[in-house]
Amino acid sequence: MIDLTLLKEKPEILRDAIKHRGADIDLDEIVELDKKRRALITELQDLRKERNAVSEKVGTLKRQGKETKTLMEKARSLADKIKDVEKKQKNIEAEFKERVQWLPNIPHASVPVGSGSEANQYIRGLREPPVFDFDVLPHWDICEALDVLDLKRAPKISGSRFILYKGLGALLERALINFFLDIHTKKHGYTEISPPVLNPESCLYGTGQFPKLEADMYKCSDDLYLAPTAEVPLTNIHREEIIAHKNLPICYTAYTPCFRREAGSYGKEVRGIKRVHQFNKVELVKYTTPEDGYAEFEKLLNDAEEVVRLLEFPYRIMLLCTGDMTFAAAKTYDIEVYAAGMKEWLEVASISCYEQYQARRANIRYRTPKGNTDYVYTMNGSGVATPRTFIALVENYQTKDGRIEIPEVLRPYINNTEYIE
RNA sequence: GGAGAGGUGGCCGAGUGGUCGAAGGCACCCGCUUGCUAAGCGGUUUCUCGCCGAAAGGCGGGACGGGAGUUCAAAUCUCCCCCUCUCCGCCA
């Protein structure tokens, strides 16, 4: 949710944001609705004030045993009028809310303006993919040969685009997850959470998946949705709260499965496990003050980057342009790892700062040192997701003779295995 | 899933349909006082929305789990929903 006073005071800021993101939104209509709604609120308040005065008088007179009939009639007609205006106001308010929830966040000043990935900005890391001195294979070939993925039987259980890790493959995935969690909890100081991943619409609205991405969610009975990312439960932990200043920043990490329909993404990228409906991810979420927001955001990026660095993956960090960010984000970095076999850069982590956008939607505030309340900054990043780190590991650590070497840092998590062969 | 009890301010806890944003206590902060492993006295302290204002602030509306209703008037009465606790049932 954007700051609604902007509609009244600085609509041009919103107009630019909408344009730069390529959103199709008629801001003038929303500004008009806002005016109408404010006028109705003012009218309502005046009416209520009058009604209260009359009611109070009725009370006084009744206690004195005096006649109140005329006044009560007046009060009743006021009450009727109030109900009338209330109804109008509620309708306008609902329409306003519906429209305003589609307004995207305002991009941070450092974000390049552009419409597609070609406008994204290289920040650091490898500029050119690494070169191998033998013919590298894509992960599906290696993993089937080594019997660590069963790509044929997974669809039998759940349909296409589901993963079945097997044997050392399953253990390798578990090793990655444990490795990530250990780094973030022990080295970076995050508190580990194991949250429920069935969440109601209100949570998804809070983090900004709703209403725009509704079609990408798996909906269960009881109006619960399978979380597409642990960002949803983690960010909603402090919903409707006022957090003490001394408790900030709050840093959470969680390993959870993630569920995404991603309808319509079939076609080109079906091979292997790059794009699937269910995957595992270690997520990082922070709540901070606005002052510390961007410093904490850079630290968050470093925390995510640390795991791909420790795994010695070929990677680069990109700053997404205005048109490439999700609509709730003010600034987003992607960490991309090169997959030697697929010969492409894979997005293994997306690190986003939402500023106060999610906090307004989920009503997450903190007490300022002066004693006021203000919205916190929320931000999150993958830390990181497994199918793609699994791909990166397999494809970059494959050997000429068809084995997979296990990186040093991971060996303690996988019975000190040196090679999958 | 069945039966019962309950949800009030940062916490505990009162509250007869009108003078209750809410007694009392705790906590907190600010004064004062005494001096001593601390106490006493006084005062302050909810959130939100609208309007005016450059701001400081001012004026007003609303909020006692959430929503609907009855009434001139609802924390207080009625209905629906959610959550918590106790007992029973079921169960990895």
Image (tube, rainbow, N blue to C red):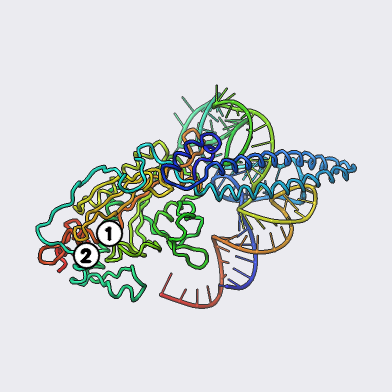
Three-letter amino acid code of the residue under disc 1: Arg
Mark 1: secondary structure: helix
Q: Which mark is residue A139?
A: 2
The residue that label 1 is drawn on is A388
Return the x and y of residue A394 as percentages of the image width and height.
20, 62
In the image: residue A7, left or right of residue A187: right
Determine the chain carrying the residue at label 2.
A
Three-letter amino acid code of the residue under disc 2: His
In the image: residue A115, left or right of residue A62: left
Spatial CA distance of label 1 from label 2 is: 10 Å
Q: How dense is the environment of label 2, judged by Cα within 10 Å: few (below 14), some, or many (20 and up)? A: many
Q: Nearer the viewer, residue A332 or A252?
A: A332
Q: Nearer the viewer, residue A233 or A219?
A: A219
In the image: residue A204, left or right of residue A379: right
The quarter of the picture where residue A417 lies is bottom left
Q: Nearer the viewer, residue B15 or A151?
A: A151
Is B83 situated above or below A301? Answer: below
